[in-house]
Amino acid sequence: MMEELKWVPSTVDVTRPSVARMYDYYLGGSHNFEADRAAAKQVEQIFPGVAQSAQANRSFLRRVVRHLMTEGVDQFLDLGSGIPTVGNVHEIAQHDNPDARVVYVDFEPVAVSHSNALLADNPNANAILADLRATSTVLAGARETLDFSRPVGVLVIAALHFVPDTDSPYEAIAQYMADLPSGSYLAITHATWDTLSEQELAEAREVAKIYSNSDNKLTMRTHAEVTRFFEGMEVLEPGVVAVNDWRPDSFDDAHVGIYGAVGRKP
């Protein structure tokens, strides 16, 4: 355990589950601790498809970045980026364009510490320790790497369902997009309870109780509430849909309770 903790910032409480480290576990990563694994396994017992959902979410991210690259966007602001694992944004973007720039933002110290270690020799990518709700702080830090006179792809993947309405998530997203030029894009994935059966809804509420003991509680939103994040933007086809239905590159008929969409700033 002591060997494992050498790379962990001293301020991190490894006895309390972290949503970022639980997500890392679902994706098969190694930067998680016993408390994270225990909570994640509780979720898996109630909802066995959680790892599959996390992977579908990650696949959506990959498709979005590749699409935006074809549209000429080579800068990305990844809000709530989580712990680095296979298929990070900079890996996808810089595979096609080594000069592509990426700024990761997360409030989880393990995520940011490990990201910056991974990016030590990468001059076009870095990570900022900040909460996505701290828009002024994030935008100021992002400007050091990104050129805000050119379009930017803002990625908010599986993060907004950890931001309650009382923390003004709609206003935060609007502020990010207001500071970016025409031709910038916003990509969001968001967990939902829409379309769940009564039994599935009961299971989902049990999952929410587990997350209530982590560093962030869940705030589920409806299709209309997720769509509201794209007000004033041109939403790309096929609109706000389940992540595995957004321009899929393979067939997957599994139900995934996560909406995904991409909008373009006119």
Image (spheres, grey):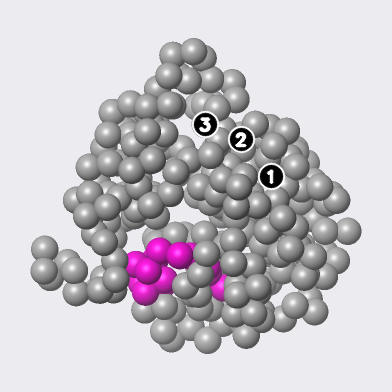
- Residue 111 painted magenta: yes
- Residue at 30% over, 50% down: 17
Q: Quadrant of residue 193?
A: top right
- Residue at 44% over, 14% down: 199
Which residue was labeled with disc 3?
256
CA distance separating discs 1 and 3: 14 Å
The residue nearer to you, when weighing 199 against 117, is 199
Say what secondary structure mark 3 lies in. loop
Image quadrant where one finds the C terminus? bottom right
Label 3, residues with CA under 10 Å away: few <14, some 14-19, many ≥20: many
Q: Quadrant of residue 200?
A: top left
Taking 239 as reference, is 58 left or right? left
Residue 261 is marked as 1
Point out residue 182 in the picture as x, y percentages from the top left corner. Answer: 85, 66
Which residue was labeled with disc 2?
221
- Residue at 65% over, 52% down: 168
- Residue at 75% over, 58% down: 174
Say what secondary structure mark 2 lies in. loop
Q: Earlier in the sequence, mark 3 or mark 2?
A: 2
Q: Which amino acid type is marked by label 3?
A: Val
The residue stretch that appears in magenta: 103-115
CA distance separating discs 3 and 2: 14 Å
The residue nearer to you, when weighing 221 against 180, is 221
Q: Which amino acid type is marked by label 1?
A: Ala
Kindly report which numbered mark, 3 or 2, lies closer to the viewer in this rendering: 2
Q: Which amino acid type is marked by label 2?
A: Arg
Point out residue 151 in the picture as x, y percentages from the top left corner. Answer: 77, 70
The answer to whether 168 is drawn above or below residue 88 in the figure is: above
- Residue 18 painted magenta: no
